[in-house]
Image (spheres, grey):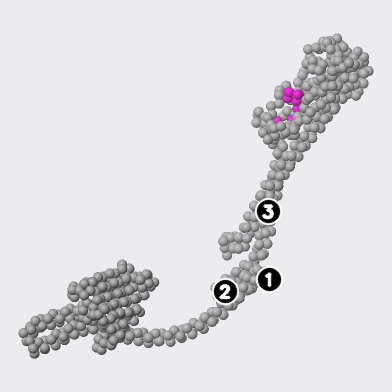
Amino acid sequence: MSALSRIDPRRSLMAGTVWLIVALAASFSIAASLWVGSIARNDIVQQHMRRLALETDQLGTDLSQAVASRLAAVGAAGRALHSLTPALFEELQSAYPELEWIAVVDATGTVAAARSSGAGGLAAGSTVGGEAWFVHGLREPWIGVIESAAEDASAPAPRGNSPRFGQLVAPLHDARGQVIGVAVTQLSWHWAPNHLPHLSEAAAPNDAAQALILDSRGIIVVGPRELRGHPWAGVAEADAAGSAGPRFEHLANGRILLVARAPLSAAYGSASPSWQVQLGEPNEHVYQRADALRQRIFWISLCLGAVTALIGALGARHLTDRLKRLAHSAAAVGRNDATRIDVPPGRDEVAQLGAAFAKILDDLQRERSELLALSSDLERRVAVRTREVERLAEESRYAAVVRERLKIARDLHDTLAHSMMAMLSEIRLLRRLQAHDPGLIKDELARAEVVAHEGLIEARTAINQMRLNAVRDTGLGAALAKAFERFIDRTGLGGEFHADPDAARFGDERAETIFRMAEEALRNIESHAMARKVDVALVADGATHLELKIEDDGVGFDPQAPHPGHYGLVGLREQARLIGAELRIDSKRNEGTTLWLSLRIAPEIL
């Protein structure tokens, strides 16, 4: 067997089984990998979203606590107003090293007191009533924007290279709760190196995350310089609109970010700025790990499917090997290379199938032996029956000759006998006339000539009927119609002829016999009945029988009485028995005669 035949499922059960196992393993592994990969991908994305939400909350909490503590310190120091001594400022710097300077501004915008660790800051007595931080700080705490030395060359250089958070402003209240001024300080965020670099510098599009701070109007107040002061332009997806957790938002440049927000609450006094901390990650970064995991699951599932298919193929080969050996054994028996089937050991279906095949083969061989013996016996019997059939065929040929002789005898009786009888009557009449009235002999001789001529015509007609078969050519109905017409023309009698269309088509060899019987009946009527009217009817009784009825109004006779020397009735009965028909003749003296013939022609009329 060629390699292609071994893997063709149409020629090998093992190949078909292996291909089925491979197809099932591949289908199940691919379906399982897609399903599990989709679940794992969704889980990874959800985990990523939860992690981003926790990081955002943590960042908002850290910033809220840091800003709140510094607002409280600045506010406490500001309430000292004119007692803002260098010792107090140094104490504040010791607690919060990022303080660069601090000042107290009264409600009119005049700097009441100021302290600084170096150059920069506000000078006592200066006016800042037009500054935005002052105007806003009279209402609620104020947090300035992030700036670096590179962004603002006019600002004092910060400590180290860390960015500055700008001004931190806290309103000041008297004992009655009235705002009497603000305390303001300039900060540099050395205490938050893990968060502020993200808040100030995570503007590159290739970074994993982007950190921003938004005010109550959605304006970016802390973040990259190119975004600062502009409203956040992200649009949430339709199915995530209104969601409180992380959600995907589309930007105007076509990018998609996973965005999480947390409130920045710097509680101080009775007011707190309603700002938000926002962390955003690109969509491709969010799905990178999830897609990688799904791809690993897919390839692992395919590998497992391949291993499963290989194991299944080996198992199928082992299981079908016994069936293969059984098939080879059966094929060898079919080619007459072996006489018995090699039954595999065991009790499984293959062993049962082999045992069944072996039993069938034994039964076939036994039946074959019996058939050979029977065939020999049949050949012997056929030879005997052949000789018997030959003998019966010889007898049948002799019977056919006898039947033909009887037919010829009946035809002679129906034709020549009648003609000879008429001539004999004429001869007797001539003898009487010669003795009593010789003058009439001439007329009688002419009549005798006519009778002899008619007899010759009838003889020729009978011979033609033997050679030709008008009944089979035209049907029984047409042949009887012509015979009845000649009868009426010859005798001058009245009468009617009727034939059903189905019955008129009947035309096998039995129709010939019925036709001759009808002719004999009409000749008997012409010769003996002295009738005035004759009716002939040929009808079909249903679909199984054909009936012939010939009725006259003549003198009648006794059908049971013997008629020595007359064979007309005898011939009619013989012909009826010959074709298996039922014949009945009803007649009484001076009451006419009815001949009724019934023939079964089932299953159908010809």
Is residue 19 rendered to the left or right of residue 474? right
Quadrant where the C terminus sits is bottom left
Is residue 41 in the magenta section? no
Closer to the camera in the image, 358 or 432: 432
Nearest the eye: 431 or 126:
431
Q: Earlier in the sequence, mark 3 or mark 2?
A: 3
Label 3, label 2: how far apart the Cα atoms are: 41 Å
State whether residue 148 appears in this view. Answer: no
The residue depicted at 23 percent of the width and 72 percent of the height is 495
Which numbered disc, 1 or 2, marks the residue that appears first in the sequence? 2
Secondary structure category for the residue under label 1: loop
Q: Residues within 10 Å of mark 1 (few under 14, many from 20)?
A: few
Side of 403 relative to 140 (left or right):
left
Secondary structure beneath disc 3? helix
Whether pointer 3 and pointer 2 mark residues with C-beta atoms closer than 8 Å, the reply is: no
Q: CA distance from mark 3 to mark 1?
A: 32 Å
Q: Nearer the viewer, mark 3 or mark 1?
A: 1
- Give the residue type at disc 3: Gly
Question: Mark 2 highlights which residue?
Answer: 333
Give the main secondary structure of the magenta stretch. Answer: loop
Q: On residue 347, which mark appears?
A: 1
**Tag 1: amino acid:** Arg
Identify the image quadrant of residue 142: top right
Tag 2, which secondary structure?
helix
**Magenta extent:** 205-219
Q: Residue at x 76, y 35 (%)?
A: 52
Answer above or below: position of 167 versus 582: above
Q: Which mark is residue 197?
A: none
Mark 3 lies on residue: 305
